[in-house]
Amino acid sequence: MPTVTSEKKRPAARSAGRPAPELIFGDLWEYDPSPETADPRLKARYDHFIGGRFTAPASGKYFDSINPANEAKLAELAHGSAADVDAAYAAARKAFDTTWGRMPGRERAKYIYRIARLLQDRAREFAVAETMDGGKAIKESRDFDVPMAAAHFFYHAGWADKLDYVAPGRKVAPLGVVGQVIPWNFPLLMLAWKLAPALAMGNTVVIKPAETTSITALKLAEIFQDAGLPPGVVNIVTGFGDTGAAIMTHPVAAKVAFTGSTEVGKIIMRSLAGTDKKMTLELGGKAANIVFDDAPIDQAVEGIVNGIFFNQGHVCCAGSRLLVHEPVAAEVLAKLKNRVKVLRIGDPLDKNTDIGAINSKEQLGTIERLVATGVKEGATMFQPACKLPSKGYYFRPTIFSGVSMSHRIAREEIFGPVLSVLTFRTLEEAVEKANNTAYGLSAGVWTDKGSRILKMSTELKAGVVWANTYNKFDPASPFGGYKESGFGREGGRQGLLDYCKLA
Ligand code: ADP
């Protein structure tokens, strides 16, 4: 498969810097297909999970869940109405009052630990289901999403009998019933991020997965049944924005937690103004990955690729802006293009695939529209000339150079495999450009100097700053944003504090 279009040779780097390497012209080797074959054990139809049982929607309405890799129907999902949300909250309230809220933490820990173990037992099956439902490459769902989801349950099982240490000198108590709504980029992992701390603390939950990616949540409900989790501790209602709104505004919810777009986050904040509900929001991002001239360039290139092309760029903390020090700008860009040319795009179930399918037709349209504005506003676009599957939703990894801060592609969250490259001359300029955004979720710094890392991590207004790496997660490490990226933290002791009352 040819990977390179005819391209003008790049000008040599500035005299102060290193010369840019030649671009490699050549073909990407074809591999034989290597599909992951584990059975995802999908059902033709999924009902809500309320009070420990799969429950048909009150309206009798279902909608289709589509595999974005080939546009085939995967299953039917229940369309949740206000009546379903009421039933879910009633079950959660009862479970809080009668079992979960009264159970000692050491007993809750056993259930959470069991959930983690059962998820590990069925890891390959869950990875295949996640990939078919959401479009992400199997190597990501297999090596990242599912193991990290299990790790979150393990970590929080470990906290459940040590809650006295969450806030030393204070007593902690659960809030009651918590309403949660999550997006489609990490369906199972976001579910684990939301459920594990809430359950460890003794809360019960009503949660809605995203409409395009609900299947692994309902598969996890099978695990809740197998683990003997008391009925009503976790209730899953599927549906669209109206169902999500009913969960967020329900009078029984003591707290709501939302991960999704800044736009919907603002709607939720407005709808809860004047109520006493606690709230945490994890919203969009427009992270800067900042490369200084003393950085290990090859590792940085790998980190940049990981930061934006990983998971098709469907990552709120994606390193979607590359800020590169002028002396190494030409070198970094040339190496980046070489790397992108050998990324494999296609069938997400193939173990060799690096970039899978875009999650939905709507999201593909959003990416295409924003990329068109980049071209129109005068940035230089680079895409490898790889062949895309004829069916399904795919988008080539895209690099824009010659981008300025006024371009829409430098300011708006694209949520796709699209990188905007800007340059800087001084540390102050890098900080200024990195912080010049409405968001503040994450950032990356690549440099050999420890002192520069410390200075940058203090000055960057981002919840997470990765140094000489990118997109690294750990259940013990709190994650969350500043500014329009939201508030509250998930993971670590800080994440637990968002799910308790302090006395
Ligand atoms: P994205 O743009 O990433 O799809 P959204 O914010 O639209 O993010 O969706 C994230 C989650 O929020 C999904 O589960 C979606 O169904 C839900 N949602 C959409 N609109 C609303 C709303 N008004 N209130 C509550 N949840 C909503």
Image (cartoon, rainbow, N blue to C red):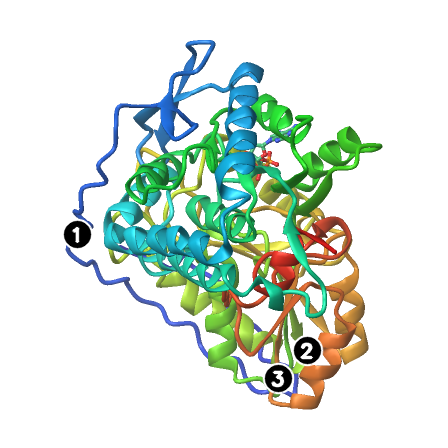
**Mark 1 secondary-structure assignment:** loop
> Does 485 sit left or right of 212 as displayed?
right
Label 3 near label 1: C-beta < 8 Å? no
Residue 489 in view: no
**Mark 3 secondary-structure assignment:** loop
Q: In front: 497, or 170?
A: 170
Mark seen at residue 447: 3
Please report the residue visible at 77 percent of the width from the left and 71 percent of the height from the top. Answer: 431
Please report the residue visible at 37 percent of the width from the left and 72 percent of the height from the top. Answer: 24
- The residue at which mark 1 appears reads as 33
Q: Residue furthest top?
A: 59
Q: In the figure, residue 433 lies in which quadrant?
A: bottom right
Q: Which quadrant of the rendered structure holds the C terminus?
A: bottom right
> Quick check: 269 above or below 62?
below
Mark seen at residue 326: 2
- Kind of residue indicated by mark 2: Glu
**Mark 2 secondary-structure assignment:** helix
Q: In front: 12, or 365?
A: 365
Label 2 near label 1: C-beta < 8 Å? no
Q: Which mark is first along the chain, 3 or 1?
A: 1
Q: In front: 60, or 222?
A: 222
Residue 269: give x, y in percent of width and height. 76, 36
Q: Which quadrant of the rendered structure holds the N terminus?
A: bottom left
Residue 162: give x, y in percent of width and height. 54, 65
Q: Which mark is first along the chain, 3 or 2?
A: 2
Work out how far the residue at label 1 is from the one at label 3, CA to CA, in angstroms: 39 Å
Mark seen at residue 502: none
Please report the residue visible at 53 percent of the width from the left and 52 percent of the height from the top. Answer: 315
| Mark 3 closeness class: few <14, some 14–19, many ≥20 residues within 10 Å | some
> Quick check: 49 above or below 135?
above
Residue 467: give x, y in percent of width and height. 59, 77
